[in-house]
Amino acid sequence: MPVAPVPMLVDCDPGLDDAIALLTAAHFADLVGITTVDGNVGIDHTTRNALAVAQIAGLDVAVHRGASRPLTDQSRGARHVHGATGLGSVELPAITRSVESEDAVGFILESSHRVNGLHLVAVGPLTNVAEALQQDASLPERLSGLTIMGGAANGGNVTAAAEFNIWADPEAADIVFRLGGDITMVGLDVTQQVLLGPAQVDQMRTARKPAADLAAELLDYAIDRSSELRGWTGAPIHDACAVLAVTHPQLFHGKRQPVSIELTGTHTRGMTVVDDRGSYADSDANVRVLRTADADALIELIVEAATAVQ
Ligand code: RIB
Ligand code: CA
């Protein structure tokens, strides 16, 4: 008896890897909605990009616009990675779609009441999720889980200590990690093991489908930036790993540990402080921290999704 696809709401800041994550969610999950947040680029661009992916891939999924800035800081951005528009150098067609609302938080809360077993996957800064929790602390009780692309048990990418999604809005992350219920953290420890290279660009291109062509162009751009910035031969498609951690949990390994968010450190603001001592009480282990994954299998699944959607 095939298992029904997980009902999934993706909160994102497209973003090269967010875009591929949306295709991954559309293929492997029951993607019930998309909410956008300021992150890699500003909210106008992240929202336009989410609409563009849905349009090009022919997704019958509503997009709801969210927070235009972090809870306390100014908008930061990661344009050096994702390009000025957030989708590299892609020339998008005219966007004929529009947002269903400008109330991402309201949509997240409404969906949690309407969709049984909803899994919330957050792959951008956690501003929308934090505001939803501030409005209704009972949100986690109605979710089958909250999976976050963010943080790292060791190191960072935007600074030596912090990963971008947490660093971009640490106050939001602090609220979510304290109040978010059954959290799974898909951090850099996992996502930087899953590098897609030119071979995957070629595989996507052979599909000769609009969404696959888009994914190939985004991946090609990401590989170029990854090579320039990190000297790597492939690009981590971070956000798709978070989606697959929900749809293919057997490919990941981790355990529940205490995780707190550094808010004041001069060099460590935005760090996910993962307690590895083992002497903590189970009740303090608030987050399932994923550490390893079957990278080869994940790479195949991401290509499968990118080439399957229209
Ligand atoms: O650090 C990687 C994360 O930051 C990804 O979600 C990427 O899209 C950016 O938002
Ligand atoms: Ca993202």
Image (cartoon, rainbow, N blue to C red):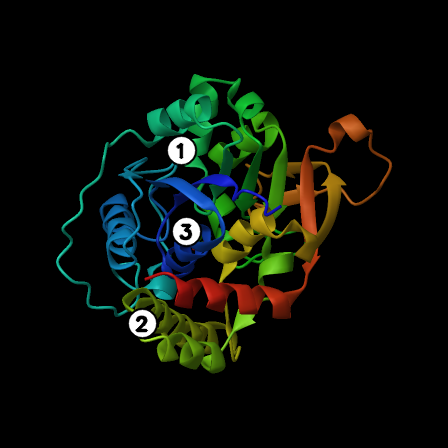
- Looking at the picture, does residue 111 appear above or below residue 54? above
Q: CA distance from mark 2 to mark 3?
A: 16 Å
Verify CB contact (< 8 Å) between mark 2 and mark 1.
no
Task: Say left or right for 234 vs 51.
Answer: right
- Looking at the picture, does residue 221 appear above or below residue 122? below
Badge 3 local density, few (<14 within 10 Å), some, or many (20+)? Answer: many
Task: Say left or right for 51 vs 36.
Answer: left
Q: CA distance from mark 3 to mark 1?
A: 21 Å
Q: Which of disc 1 and disc 3 is earlier in sequence?
A: 3
Q: Amino acid at mark 3?
A: Ala
View extreme (front): residue: 1
> Mark 1 near ligand 2 (CB under 8 Å)?
no
Give the labeled residue for mark 2. 213
Give the labeled residue for mark 1. 128
Picture mark count = 3
Residue 310: give x, y in percent of width and height: 32, 62
View extreme (right): residue: 279
Q: Amino acid at mark 2?
A: Asp
Mark seen at residue 26 = 3
| Residue 158 in view | no
Residue 112, image quadrant:
top left
Q: Which of disc 3 and disc 2 is earlier in sequence?
A: 3
Q: Residue at x 58, y 58 (%)?
A: 160
Q: Amino acid at mark 1?
A: Asn
Residue 263: give x, y in percent of width and height: 55, 36
Residue 145: give x, y in percent of width and height: 58, 34
